Image: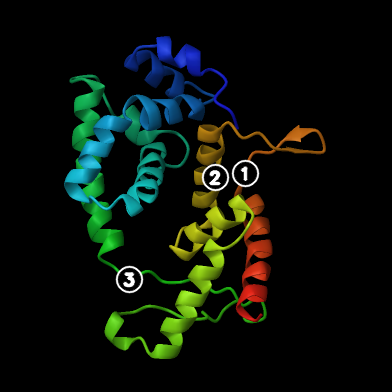
């Protein structure tokens, strides 16, 4: 989904952009521009201070976006009362968030989702701790990750990596929307523009799982 009003956003002040984001219907494209373009240098600096590993940058920023967006009403952003500059507020807010992200996500083991359609309630494997992993589970984990990263379809690869890291379909749908927006991607189905939602993500995930199982059993 292309950010069609990028030139307009560039001309707006921070306060005007926030007003555009908070006005109903909310303009998420304006939020993508504000956080992923205008304030990316500031947020990247805070990320380096608290996390540093660029392998986590996309995940951390996507979660930060969702954190500010809340349940869709931008509650966290609307709590900013302009008693300081937006940059100053984002600096403090992102520091707290990245510090929490490091403790909550990076230092905790990742639970890998089930990809076995025949036994959807039984995880193929979990990663409770390095000491408890046996060789078979470790090899299975590596196989699934490697297969996911070899998926030819970019959306399938993106969705599966996020799902394997523990994000639910609604969260991945928002991330996919932002990914399309940043890349200027517009997709159509029956002459209508596609806006990824949790059902769209689930459908991609189902196809990706089938591809992964094929690769693993070749």
Residue pointed to by mark 1: 196
Placement of the N terminus among the 4 image quadrants: top right
Q: Is residue 113 visible?
A: no
Q: Position of residue 202 (x, y in %)?
A: 63, 58
The residue that appears at 24% across and 56% down in the rendered structure is: 102
Badge 3 or badge 2: first in the primary sequence: 3
User: Which of the pair 85/162 is nearer the observer?
Assistant: 162
User: Which of the pair 209/151 is nearer the observer?
Assistant: 151
Q: Are marks 2 and 1 in contact (CB under 8 Å)?
A: yes
- Relative placement, left or right, of 175 versus 200 is left
| Secondary structure state at the residue bearing disc 2 | helix
Examine the rendered structure and indicate whether residue 161 appears above or below residue 125. above
Q: CA distance from mark 1 to mark 3?
A: 28 Å
Placement of the C terminus among the 4 image quadrants: bottom right
Residue pointed to by mark 2: 176
Q: Is residue 20 visible?
A: yes
Q: Position of residue 122 (x, y in %)?
A: 54, 81
The residue that appears at 28% across and 68% down in the rendered structure is: 108
Residue pointed to by mark 3: 109
The residue that appears at 27% across and 26% down in the rendered structure is: 80
Examine the rendered structure and indicate whether residue 14 appears above or below residue 121. above
Q: Position of residue 29 (x, y in %)?
A: 50, 27
| Secondary structure state at the residue bearing disc 3 | loop
Pick out the residue farthest to the right. Answer: 190
């Amino acid at each position: 989904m292309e950010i069609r009003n990028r030139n307009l956003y560039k001309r707006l002040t921070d306060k005007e952009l926030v007003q555009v984001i908070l006005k109903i219907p909310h303009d998420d494209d304006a939020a993508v521009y504000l956080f992923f373009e205008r304030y990316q240098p500031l947020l990247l600096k805070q990320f380096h201070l608290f996390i540093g590993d660029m392998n986590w940058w996309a995940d951390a920023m996507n979660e930060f976006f969702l954190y500010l967006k809340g349940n869709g009403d931008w509650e966290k952003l609307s709590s900013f009362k302009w008693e300081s500059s937006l940059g100053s507020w984002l600096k403090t807010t992102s520091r707290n968030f990245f510090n929490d992200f490091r403790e909550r996500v990076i230092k905790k083991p990742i639970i890998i989702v089930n990809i076995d359609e025949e036994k959807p309630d039984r995880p193929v494997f979990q990663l409770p701790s390095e000491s408890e992993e046996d060789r078979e589970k470790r090899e299975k984990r590596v196989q699934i990750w490697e297969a996911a990263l070899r998926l030819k379809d970019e959306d399938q690869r993106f969705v599966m990596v996020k799902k394997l890291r523990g994000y639910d379909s609604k969260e991945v749908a928002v991330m996919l929307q932002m990914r399309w927006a940043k890349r200027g991607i517009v997709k159509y189905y029956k002459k209508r523009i596609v806006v990824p939602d949790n059902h769209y993500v689930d459908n991609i995930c189902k196809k990706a799982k089938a591809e992964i199982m094929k690769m693993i059993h070749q």
